[in-house]
Image (cartoon, rainbow, N blue to C red):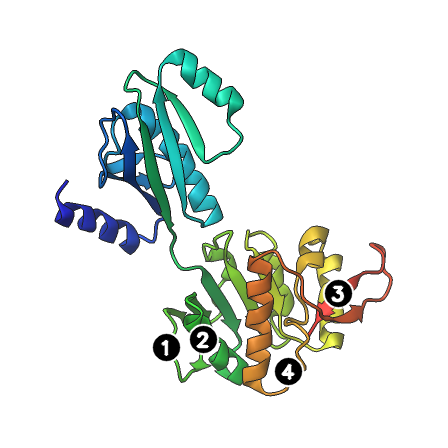
Amino acid sequence: MKSQDFARVLDELAAKKEPFAVATVVRIEGSSIGKPGFKAVVSKDGKILFGTVGGVCPESAIAEMAMNAMRTGKAKTVKVFLEDARKALEGIVKSQTEDEVHVETNCGGMMEIYVEPYLPSERLVLIGQGGKDDIEDALVKLGKLLDFEVIVIDHMPVLSGEPDRLITDLDYDVSKFEFNPSDSVVVLTKGERDVAVLQALSRKKARFVGLMASGQRVRDDIEALRAKGVNRDFVEAIHAPIGVDIGAVAPEEIALSIMTDIIATKHGKHLPHKPLVLEASSTGAHQRKTN
């Protein structure tokens, strides 16, 4: 494998913002086609795009490990035992860890393979209303500092920092935007377009949707969403008003509370919010979150 070809493949995948994994043989024992330093690039759907770790048998097992690493975002070292049919079956039955794989082949050796996922930056999507918004401005800077790809949908933003992508079409239809399941979306529409934007987002898949608003406006918006028949699970999952309770006052502090909320959600954590009690309705009374 030529190092320049390997680097070219990685650069092409990174440019397309596609997740991939690199599997590298780091140690062997006994007989093995793969040798230390052998590498394979694995696509998000488990295909070997480039290189090899030593043939079809170990690669089929490593492809599964690579896809799992891309799902979790965590690298791992895997032991692949290259055994005859009887030993492979015994090994599968006795194995107590998912970091060991027993493959039926006649090589008779063992390979240690380091599987490392490469994932594109997660996206922070800010939906603004136009004009000067110090919180929006602070979120652009803080999002980029935290290695998010920052996308701003705002027809007339006033920003001191430059987002990675800026959509300035007047009256842009958010339903046309291709959201990713790992996206974090912050709605900064200041009342006028809250319901329309949230209704469009309810038809998309995003890990985090938050609304910057006062308690009263949150109540009004949620009741309007209910009246329009928006999916109840989506409505109850909205972080509104957005941000964790850190006593934030200044725009930069509020932006920090919002990004803390986003990061906590990313890692499956639930940090304290001030309670916001909604009035009882046909769907019942619910507790919401606020900063």
How far apart are the alpha carbons under marks 1 and 3?
Answer: 33 Å
- Where disc 2 sits, the SS reads helix
Q: Residue 121 bears which disc, if any?
A: none
| Mark closest to the chain's N terminus, 3 or 2 | 2
Question: Which residue is disc 1 drawn over?
Answer: 162
| Mark closest to the chain's N terminus, 1 or 2 | 2
Q: Position of residue 234 (x, y in %)?
A: 66, 54
- Where disc 3 sits, the SS reads strand
Residue 129 to residue 112: above or below: below
How far apart are the alpha carbons under marks 1 and 2?
Answer: 7 Å
Q: Inspect the image, locate mark 3, and give the three-letter code of the amino acid beneath it.
A: Arg
How far apart are the alpha carbons under marks 3 and 4?
Answer: 18 Å
- Compared across the picture, whether 277 is left or right of 232 comes to right
| Mark closest to the chain's N terminus, 1 or 4 | 1
Q: Do the numbered discs 1 and 4 sit on residues whose CB atoms are within 8 Å?
A: no
Q: Do the numbered discs 1 and 2 sit on residues whose CB atoms are within 8 Å?
A: yes
Q: Inspect the image, locate mark 1, and give the three-letter code of the amino acid beneath it.
A: Glu
Q: Do the numbered discs 1 and 3 sit on residues whose CB atoms are within 8 Å?
A: no
Residue 83 to residue 166: above or below: above
Query: Label 3: how many residues lie within 10 Å, few (<14), some (14-19) or many (20+)?
Result: many
Question: Which residue is disc 2 drawn over?
Answer: 140
Question: Which residue is disc 3 drawn over?
Answer: 288
How far apart are the alpha carbons under marks 4 and 2?
Answer: 18 Å
